[in-house]
Image (tube, grey):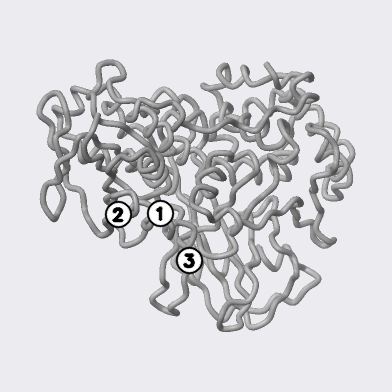
Amino acid sequence: MSGRVVILGGGLAGLAAALRLAEVGRSVEVLETRPRLGGRATSFEDPRSGRILDNCQHVVLGCCTNLLDFYERLGVLEEIEWHREFHWANPPHEPDRLAIAALPAPLHLGPSFLRQRRLSWREKQRLARAIWRILRMGRAARLAAQDRTFAALLRELGQTDRELEQFWSPVIVSACNLEPHEVGASFALQVIQEGFLAHRFAASMGLARGSLLSLYEPVGEFLAAKGGVIRTGVSVKGLQFDGRRVRGVVTDEGVIDAAAVISALPPDRLHKLCSEALRAADPRLGRLEEIGMSPILGVHLFFEEAFTDLPHLVLPGRATQWVFMKGRDESGRFHVHAVISAAESWMPLDEPTIARRVMEDLRWAFPRTRVPDPVEARSVKEKRATFAARPGVDRLRPSARAGVLGGVENLYLAGDWCDTGWPATMEGAVRSGYAAAAALAGDDSLGPVADLPTARLSAWLGLGR
């Protein structure tokens, strides 16, 4: 297939597809409604202060091989700062540390796990038995767990409310944007198996030194050098469908002819663009409105003085799951970025109430330190941040490939909500973009790159299944 490829959406999925197609000489045009790239993982200029703020703190883990590949192709991988230990609040004591030791997976987190002071020996024993059984289940267990919640599985593994609060919930809510009693067990199992048990580097956490938006700056220059273009501020109104193929994209600036279209839009947005005839012609489009969404709240707080030298902190048992200490900004103020995932109950709240609740959690986490009142607070609500990874949703997630089950032959789909095999993550978004590019070009080498290899001991103990 030759001719112009129009990509709808300038988030990670759309940019990943555009990058890979441009690398093999395809003419690409990316359309993005917002004035900036990145979709739901981006930055914006705060009109109150003029600061460039991330909409939410996003992280990359060592197991996110495709996201890291994307950054490497853009030449920004050196802008990622790696952390090999996690700090967990344990008031009134000093925070616990969960650190990666120089041991083969799955033993690499064992020594620091045994030193966790907020957990009793009995709780550690129950947690260790559950983790052992999750390891022994192997990857095949995920398919069998598609129709149940992770909390139901944890109950069968002997976990109490205390273990859910102190260990499982902070990990799973942050990774899947749903509570354990809502999230599908298959998604949570993948997080634990791939992120904590398969490879020693997998749990390493990377944070962007600058803004998220700065990571995407090279994309435009790269596409322009290859004859492509990115157009922001362009609103897509519909797709021209002739009964067999998509012939063009209708925008607020006119119609753009297309040899092929990749939609990297959220499912609800794509559903609104599709005519009844198009939905009837492509089985992938028939149930888009059934894919639910889950919100995330990011809260930026600015202080005159620093009150901790920790880089980040997990807050088990609190509504605020993580806080990231960003250091001093250009004005000299200490910047703290708090993250509340699965934030449905927070969406109706006003900004002063949000800031007050986050400050209550911060003061709980640092009882030995005087945490001053912030001089500025800015909340950012992403009401439709991720697809809701509930049990059974995999049956609704469509393939990137055109023509699947008799679908429209030149329409390709991308987005973390597609059938990536991953939860709603930046890694899943990039994987979907790579998959769509490979399907369109008929070149499997453009598809997702390999996962980290499973450590020999982990594979021998059961994860190889």
Q: Which residue is pictured at 41% across the width and 38% down the height?
A: 433
Graded by Cα atoms within 10 Å as few (under 14), some (14 to 19) or many (20 or more), the crowding at tag 1 reads: many
Q: Horizontally, is 261 left or right of 98 in the view?
A: left
Q: Position of residue 124 (x, y in %)?
A: 84, 37
Q: Which residue is pictured at 81% across the width and 27% down the height?
A: 129
Q: Which residue is pictured at 40% across the width and 42% down the height?
A: 23
Say whether disc 2 or disc 1 marks the residue closer to the N-terminus.
Answer: 1
Is 52 or 297 nearer to us in this picture?
A: 52
Tag 2 secondary structure? strand
Q: CA distance from mark 2 to mark 1?
A: 9 Å
In this rendering, the label closer to the viewer, 3 or 1? 1
Tell me the residue that label 3 is attached to. 379
Q: Position of residue 350 (x, y in %)?
A: 44, 67
Tag 3 secondary structure? strand
Q: Position of residue 340 (x, y in %)?
A: 55, 55
The circle drawn on residue 301 is none
Graded by Cα atoms within 10 Å as few (under 14), some (14 to 19) or many (20 or more), the crowding at tag 2 reads: many
Q: Are marks 2 and 1 in contact (CB under 8 Å)?
A: yes
* Figure quadrant of residue 245: top left
The circle drawn on residue 230 is 2
Q: CA distance from mark 3 to mark 1?
A: 28 Å
Can residue 416 be seen at all in this image of the molecule?
Answer: yes
Q: Amino acid at mark 2?
A: Ile
Q: Horizontally, is 250 left or right of 126 in the view?
A: left
Tell me the residue that label 1 is attached to. 219
Q: Which residue is pictured at 30% across the width and 28% down the height?
A: 287
Q: CA distance from mark 2 to mark 3?
A: 29 Å
Q: Position of residue 79 (x, y in %)?
A: 59, 59
Graded by Cα atoms within 10 Å as few (under 14), some (14 to 19) or many (20 or more), the crowding at tag 3 reads: many
Q: Quadrant of the C terminus?
A: top right
* Figure quadrant of residue 62: top right
